[in-house]
Amino acid sequence: MFGSKKNKGNLLEMYPVKNSNVSDEMIDGQLKLTVYHAGIFRSTYEKWFPNYGKSFINLDKYGQFVWQHCTGNFTVNDIFIQMQKHFSNEPDLTLERLVVFIRILVNNKLIKLLKEK
C-alpha cells in the first residue's frame, strides 16, 4: 500500500553524495557541518535570530574522513578500504560502525546514496 522509498541494493556498492543543504567548514582541525533547513518563515526569523533554520554538527576523526569521501566518486566499500589504510592501527574501526554512520547520514538527509556514479 505505502511503498518504501529506501534504496534497493547493496549498501556497500552505493555512492554517497553530500546534499546541497549542508555546508562544511574546518575550524581548528574540527570539521563542522551546517545544515540549512527550509521553511516559509525562515527568512523572516533569520533577520532577528541569525542561526534560525540552521543546525550545527561537529564530526570526530572517523566522521570527518567519511564526510570528505562522500563525493560520489567512492562506494561505501571503497571508503571502508581507505579507512582501513588510513586508520590501520585503530582497533575500533569496523564495517558495522561505518554502515551505521552512513545510515544516520542518510536518515538525517545529510547525504544521498546513488547506485551509479
Image (cartoon, helix red, strand yellow):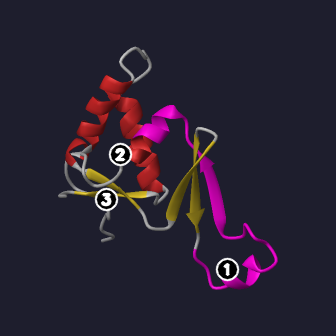
- Chain-order first, disc 2 or disc 1: 1
**Which one is nearer the viewer's eye here, 4 or 36?**
36
Q: Which residue is drawn at 22% across and 56% down?
A: 8
| Residue 72 drawn at (x, y percent) | 28, 55
**Mark 1 highlights which residue?**
42
First in residue order: circle 2 vs circle 3 = 3
Apparent side of residue 40 relative to residue 86 in the rendered image (left or right): right
Residue 101 is situated, as x and y percent measured from the top left of the image, at 44, 41
Q: Does the magenta stretch include residue 44?
A: yes
Q: Mark 3 points at which residue?
A: 6
Relative placement, left or right, of 27 versus 4 is: right
| Disc 2 from disc 3: Cα separation | 22 Å
Q: Which amino acid does label 2 sit on?
A: His
The image quadrant that residue 96 belongs to is top left
Q: What stretch is highlighted in magenta?
A: 38-65
Residue type pointed to by label 1: Arg
Residue that badge 2 annotates: 69
